[in-house]
Each structure stands twice: as structure tokens, then as C-alpha cells.
Image: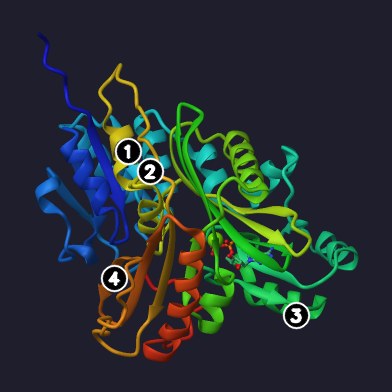
């Protein structure tokens, strides 16, 4: 019997994340090559699951892409790279350029745009008939003035390719809008302007395989991420009540977003705003696992680890098909905050619903799990209040990313 040749994966992460992906890829028998930032050389990586690790100079800044292309091409002289996988949002376009250069299958550069560039995703979604906030690219100043004269304020002025609410400004008048645009100077074309829709921000986390949704779960943030990031709040999220109109509308829109933007195979974290009148607007999508412990939230609710499933898909030997895991129907909630204590004491958080406690310096977080939505909701509220009393602190965020 012929021995199956293992798939060689080059995973890329300029950020410290993706352990479960690397571990599962190895467990599945893939050859795991990993490219990360020099500044993360001493970070705790699951080295036993990585066949070879490489570092790109970063000086805590973006990698220099022409060098990345040369470095990976050099590696390709001796390794046959089957898959290039971007573990963090900022790596999606890097992976796409490498694929384009080495002619490796997967998402190419123009495809990746729809999952990174908030203007590109808005335009494509709108063309597909998906409701989006009114928006405009920061290109032509007459057009911007016209937009500001017909669309009611407030607006968001947001970078097209950031994450984590970085560099976003809410503006209330044309003057404020122009102040923000002018401050961006020669970088203004890298922004878009859109109408601010007050509401609840929902997220839908998905596994796609060959153009089909294989797994999906919908949740909603306790407070809009913008408020959490800019004003300082405890970050929370909880699954949406199952078999409700909201859940089914989120699933339908999510599928429409992913198919019209063209995600064939992989994972996605997609966000929607639920406005006061209940209508949903597409906020943004991505081709990666959601950050901020959302994968833990999903795992607590469903038993499915998104990182591991993604690794299984990418490690599939030629000719083998992915079969999605059975998803449990529990409910989960997530709480997360900066802590004033270096090592916060969570010993008082002992409800049977506590599924996971997160232990990180100056951070505090936990995941709740139950088969009852009401239980989760009750503890989410109590524990959020207790977090404010026991641990909460806030450091105003920088306008620009620091990593
Ligand atoms: N048009 C909008 N209307 C209302 N809130 C918005 C809008 N755009 C962004 N926000 C707020 O800003 C947060 C971050 O915006 P988002 O587009 O999701 O970018 P990212 O999460 O990549 O930083 C959202 O979760 C939401 O709270
Ligand atoms: Mg977002």
C-alpha cells in the first residue's frame, strides 16, 4: 500500500496565537512549518508540534513584504509547500501574496481583499443585496461633501485594513469628519467613512468547506466592541438564543456574505449590527478565527475547537474529504477584562457554570457554560458586575497598533 505523503503547511503568524492550529496540524500528520516575527522568538510556541520555525525581522513593526517573498521562495527550494495558512488577520494578505508568487492554491490577493479591506467587503456585499451602512471611500472630496450633506450623522471614519477598533473615530459633523480625514494626510485613501448605526453587535463564527457552511454559531457582544476598546468596559459575549428569528436571520445573512465574498474553505468570524428596529446590517468579515477568546466561547457552547477543525481541513491529504464534527447545543458566555492586579485572584468565581478561567498577567477572564440560556445570562450579569468591582481597569488605547 502506498504511504500517503503528508501535506506540508506553512503557517504564518506575526502575532502570538494559533497554538491549537499548530498542534492539531501536527497531530493530523502534516509537516508543520511556521513563520513568525523575530520579536516573538522567545514566546511560548508549541515547539513539539512545529517541524521548523522561521523568524522575520520586525523591530515590532510590519514585516517587509519583498523580503518575506524572497525568504519563503528560498524555503521553497527545499520544501514543497502545499498550503499557506494565515493565523492572524494581519497575515491574510501576506499569505495571499506568497500564494500568488509561488502559485500555491488558496485565496489570492484580490480574493483576500474582500476579507481584509473594509471598503472592498462593503462594496461587494452591497452589490449582493446585503444591507450595509451607507458608506464611501475617502477618495474624492466633492463626493465626500455630497455624502455628508445627504446621509445623517454620526459617521465612523475607519481604517480600511486595521482590527480591534484601532484608529476609528466617531464623528458628529462635517467639520469633525474633515478634521479626522485631514489628520490622516497622505494616508486618507486608506480610510472609509460610513454611517454609524447604533445597536447590538453580533458575531457569527463559521467553518466553510468547499463553498458550504459546515458549522456555524451566532453570538452577541454585551456592549459594542468600539465602546469596550475606546471607553474601557468589560468585554463580554454570549451565544444567541437558538432557533429564534434572530439566529436564523444571522445564519442566512452570514451565508450570503461568505458566498458573495467568495470564502470557499476555511474559517470566518463575521460581524453584524442589530439596529434598534431589529434589522441587521453587515459590519465586517474575516477569514480567520475570531480573537479575544471567541474560539473558547465557541468550544464551550458546541464542543468544537475552530482552530483544530481548521487545522484538520488544511492537513487533509489529497483526495480525502473533511467531515464536520457533531456540534453540541449548550450555551456559553465570555467575560474578559484588563485587571488592576498582576495575578488576579479568581477563587471566588465558583459557580458550576464556570467552564474555564483565564490566567494571564494583568488580565482576567472566564467562560461560562450551561445547557440553559437563562443560567448563562444570569451569571453573565452577576459576574460582569463583580469584575468591575474586583478587577477592572482601563488603559486608553493608542490610535495606532503597537505590534
Ligand atoms: N457603522 C458603524 N455603526 C456602528 N458601530 C460601528 C460601525 N462601524 C464600527 N462600529 C463599531 O466599531 C467596532 C469596530 O468596528 P469594525 O468595523 O468591526 O472593525 P474592527 O473590529 O476590525 O476594528 C464595532 O464592533 C462597532 O462597535
Ligand atoms: Mg470588528
Residue 351 is situated, as x and y percent measured from the top left of the image, at 33, 72
| 362 left or right of 124 in image | left
The local crowd at label 1, few if under 14, some if 14 to 19, many if 20 or more residues have their Cα within 10 Å, is many
CA gap between label 3 and label 1 equals 42 Å
Q: Mark 4 — residue?
A: 358
Residue underneath mark 2: 95
Residue that badge 1 annotates: 84
The residue carrying pointer 4 sits among few (fewer than 14), some (14 to 19) or many (20 or more) residues within 10 Å by Cα, namely: some
Q: Position of residue 129 (x, y in %)?
A: 75, 40
Residue that appears at 60% across and 42% down: 251
Q: Which comes sooner in the sequence, label 3 or label 1? A: 1
Q: Earlier in the sequence, mark 3 or mark 2?
A: 2
Image quadrant for the C terminus?
Answer: bottom left
| Quarter occupied by the N terminus | top left
In the rendered structure, are the residues bearing label 1 and label 2 in contact, judged by CB atoms less than 8 Å apart? yes
To which residue does mark 3 refer? 176
CB within 8 Å, label 2 to label 4: no
Q: Does residue 138 appear anywhere in the picture?
A: no
Choose mark 3 or mark 4, whichever is in front.
Answer: 4
**Mark 4 or mark 1: which comes first in sequence?**
1
Q: Against 240, is 338 above or below?
A: below
Amino acid at each position: 500500500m502506498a504511504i500517503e505523503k503528508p501535506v506540508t503547511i506553512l503557517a504564518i503568524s506575526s502575532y502570538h496565537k494559533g497554538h491549537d492550529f499548530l498542534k492539531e496540524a501536527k497531530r493530523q500528520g502534516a509537516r508543520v512549518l511556521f513563520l513568525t516575527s523575530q520579536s516573538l522568538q522567545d514566546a511560548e510556541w508549541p515547539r513539539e508540534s512545529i517541524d521548523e520555525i522561521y523568524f522575520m525581522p520586525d523591530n515590532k513593526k510590519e514585516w517587509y513584504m519583498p523580503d518575506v517573498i524572497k525568504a519563503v521562495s528560498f524555503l521553497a527550494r527545499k520544501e514543497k509547500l502545499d498550503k499557506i495558512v494565515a493565523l492572524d488577520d494581519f497575515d491574510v494578505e501576506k499569505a495571499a501574496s506568497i500564494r500568488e508568487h509561488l502559485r500555491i492554491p488558496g485565496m489570492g490577493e484580490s480574493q483576500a481583499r474582500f476579507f481584509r479591506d473594509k471598503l472592498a467587503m462593503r462594496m461587494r456585499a452591497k452589490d449582493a443585496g446585503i444591507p450595509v451602512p451607507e458608506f464611501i471611500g475617502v477618495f474624492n472630496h466633492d463626493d465626500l461633501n455630497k455624502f455628508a450633506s445627504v446621509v445623517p450623522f454620526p459617521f465612523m471614519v475607519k481604517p480600511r485594513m486595521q482590527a480591534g477598533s484601532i484608529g476609528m473615530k466617531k464623528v458628529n459633523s462635517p467639520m469633525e469628519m474633515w478634521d479626522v480625514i485631514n489628520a490622516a494626510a497622505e494616508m486618507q485613501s486608506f480610510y472609509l467613512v460610513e454611517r454609524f448605526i447604533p445597536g447590538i453587535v453580533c458575531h457569527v463564527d463559521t467553518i466553510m468547506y468547499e463553498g458550504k457552511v459546515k458549522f456555524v454559531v451566532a453570538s452577541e457582544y454585551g456592549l459594542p466592541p468600539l465602546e469596550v476598546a475606546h471607553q474601557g468596559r468589560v468585554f463580554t459575549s454570549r451565544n444567541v438564543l437558538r432557533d429564534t428569528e434572530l439566529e436564523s436571520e444571522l445564519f442566512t445573512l452570514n451565508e450570503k456574505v461568505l458566498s458573495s465574498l467568495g470564502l470557499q474553505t476555511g474559517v470566518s468570524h463575521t460581524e453584524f449590527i442589530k439596529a434598534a428596529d431589529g434589522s441587521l446590517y453587515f459590519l465586517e468579515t474575516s477569514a480567520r478565527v475570531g480573537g479575544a477568546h471567541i474560539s473558547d466561547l465557541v468550544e464551550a457552547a458546541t464542543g468544537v475547537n475552530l482552530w483544530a477543525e481548521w487545522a484538520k481541513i488544511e492537513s487533509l491529504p489529497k483526495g480525502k474529504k473533511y467531515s464536520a464534527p457533531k456540534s453540541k447545543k449548550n450555551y456559553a458566555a465570555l467575560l474578559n477584562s484588563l485587571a488592576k492586579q498582576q495575578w488576579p485572584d479568581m477563587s471566588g468565581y465558583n459557580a458550576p457554570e464556570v467552564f474555564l478561567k483565564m490566567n494571564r498577567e494583568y488580565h482576567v477572564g472566564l467562560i461560562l457554560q450551561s445547557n440553559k440560556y437563562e443560567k448563562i445570562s444570569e451569571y453573565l450579569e452577576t459576574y460582569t458586575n463583580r469584575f468591575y468591582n474586583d478587577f477592572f481597569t482601563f488603559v486608553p488605547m493608542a490610535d495606532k497598533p503597537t505590534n
